Image (tube, grey):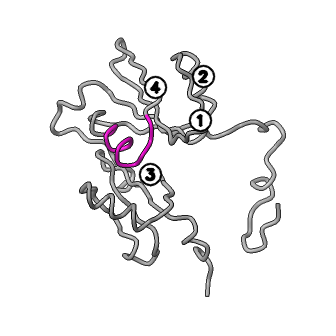
Amino acid sequence: MTMKTESIREESVTPPDQTRGFSFNHTMLRVKEPERSLDFYCRIIGMRLLRKIDFPDLRFSLYFLRFCTSEDSVPQDSAERTCWLFGQSGVLELTHNWGTETDPDFSYHDGNRQPQGFGHLCVSVPDLAAAVSWFDENNIAFVKRPDEGKMKDIAFIKDPDGYWIEILQPDLLGELGRTR
C-alpha cells in the first residue's frame, strides 16, 4: 500500500506476520452513573447493550456496547455472547466502580483538561445535520458544533461523564488535511 500524499514509516504500512489476525476489540471508559451513561450511549448514540458482568467481590460492573446491524447474529446464551463479543471490533466497555454514583464530588478526568491524555471517541453518522438536530432535541452538550472553529463539518459532544465524542459524516471530509 503506497500513500503518495503522506510520509509514513514502512513498519506502520506493513505489519509483521506475527500480528496477523490481531484486531481492535474495545476501549473502556469509567462512568459514574451507569443508568445515565447507558441511556446516552444506547438511546442517544444508538449502541446496543450486549452484556453486563458484575464483580461483587471487587465492587464494579462492566457494560459492553456496540453498534449492531440486522445482519449481526448476537448469541442468546450469555457465555456464547461473551465469546462472540470479544471477537468483534468497535466495542465500548463502560466500567462502573460501585459507590461513585452517590458521591456528589466525584468525577472522572475527561482527558482534555490538563494534564491532557485521552482525547475522544468518534462516531460517524450518515447525516451530520440530522445528528446535530437530534443532539439538540435531547439537550446534549456540545464542545464544538460543525460550523465552529477551523475544522468544519466535525462536531464534538459530551457524554454524561464529560468524555468528548467526535461526530462526523465521512463523505464531508475528503479534503480534510489537504493544503490549498
Q: Residues within 10 Å of mark 3 (few under 14, many from 20)?
A: few
Find out whether the residues at labels 1 and 4 contact each other: C-beta distance under 8 Å: no
From the image, tell me which residue sits under label 4: 51
The stretch drawn in magenta includes residue 61: no
- Residue highlighted by disc 2: 83
Q: Residue 6: name its quadrant.
A: bottom right
Location of residue 18 (image quadrant) = top right
Q: Residue furthest bottom?
A: 180
Magenta stretch, residue numbers: 37-48
Instruction: Give the image location of residue 155, x and y in percent.
Output: 41, 65
Q: Nearer the observer, disc 1 or disc 4?
A: 1
**SS state under label 4:** strand
Principal secondary structure, stretch drawn in magenta: helix
Q: CA distance from mark 2 to mark 4?
A: 11 Å
Mark positioned earlier in the residue sequence (3 or 2):
2
Mark identifier at residue 72: 1
Q: Quadrant of the N terminus?
A: bottom right
- Going by the numbered disc 2, the residue's amino acid type is Cys
Which residue: 59% across, 35% down?
72
Counting residues from the start of the chain, the first of labels 1 and 4 encountered is 4
Residue 117, numbered circle: 3
